[in-house]
Image: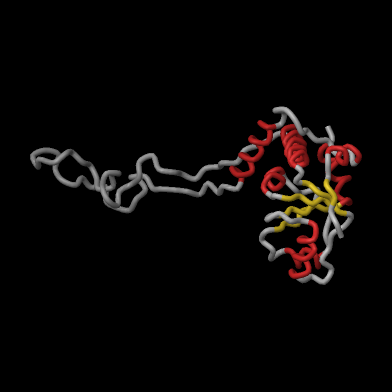
Amino acid sequence: MSAKAFTNKEADAAKIEIIAEGDKGLQAIHDLVVAYRANRRTGSASTKTRGEVSGTTKKMYKQKGTGNARHGAKTAPIFVGGGVAFGPRPRDYSKKVTKKTRKLAFQRALGARISEGAVSSVSSFSASDGKSKTFVKEVSAICDKPRALIIAKGYDEKTYLAGRNVSWALLQTAAEVNVEQILHYDQIILVEDSFETLAQRSAS
């Protein structure tokens, strides 16, 4: 099995719409990647205020005559064991991105990688015996870069099993691959059965 370079001409033949030049789509990529990363945040960071920490609210000492500054309780933020002033509270970091922006970012990201010469195509891909050794051998035969992203319409269970422990290679379906993955991996291998789905995802 050998891979051949996937160029703009091949993309046109497969009816995959891409944006390879100019500034169009760059802001869409930025917005989408920021949204991906924001949506992965749990937003669970939390601190207690002076009203929530455990401790008495009794006045520490009398108001006047001690020579100390006036204080109402040991739970004040300046004391050890006191509350936190303006600390983080649970919040939702998620961001929404429109379908139009997602499609524009997808077209630009894929077009940029094709222009770089980082995309190749193969007629098929599988590791039918379910062994990682076979999987590595198959990927190494079509890719000489450190990290590989393989995109197909789907994979059989044995192939998924063989590739799940190979950290430098990722099997992804054409329907689920995202812009962040397209930009992250050094080499992208497109299996021919993925062309139709990619064309549908990139269609204006």
Q: Residue furthest left?
A: 65
Q: Position of residue 51 (x, y in %)?
A: 34, 45
Q: Residue at x 11, y 38 (%)?
A: 64
Q: Position of residue 95 (x, y in %)?
A: 62, 38
Residue 36 location, quadrant: top right
Q: So how many labels did they put on this image? A: 0
Residue 94 placement, left or right of 203: left
Q: Position of residue 46 (x, y in %)?
A: 45, 48
Identify the image quadrant of the N terminus: bottom right
Residue 102 placement, left or right of 51: right
Residue 180 placement, left or right of 114: left
Q: Position of residue 63 (x, y in %)?
A: 14, 39
Q: Is residue 154 above or below residue 51?
A: below
Identify the image quadrant of the C terminus: top right
Q: Residue at x 77, y 54 (%)?
A: 150
Residue 64 placement, left or right of 116: left
Q: Nearer the viewer, residue 93 or 184?
A: 184
Q: Residue at x 64, y 40 (%)?
A: 33
Q: Residue at x 75, y 33 (%)?
A: 104
Q: Nearer the viewer, residue 203 or 46?
A: 203
Q: Is residue 183 above or below residue 131?
A: above
- The way the protein has been coloured in the rendering is secondary structure
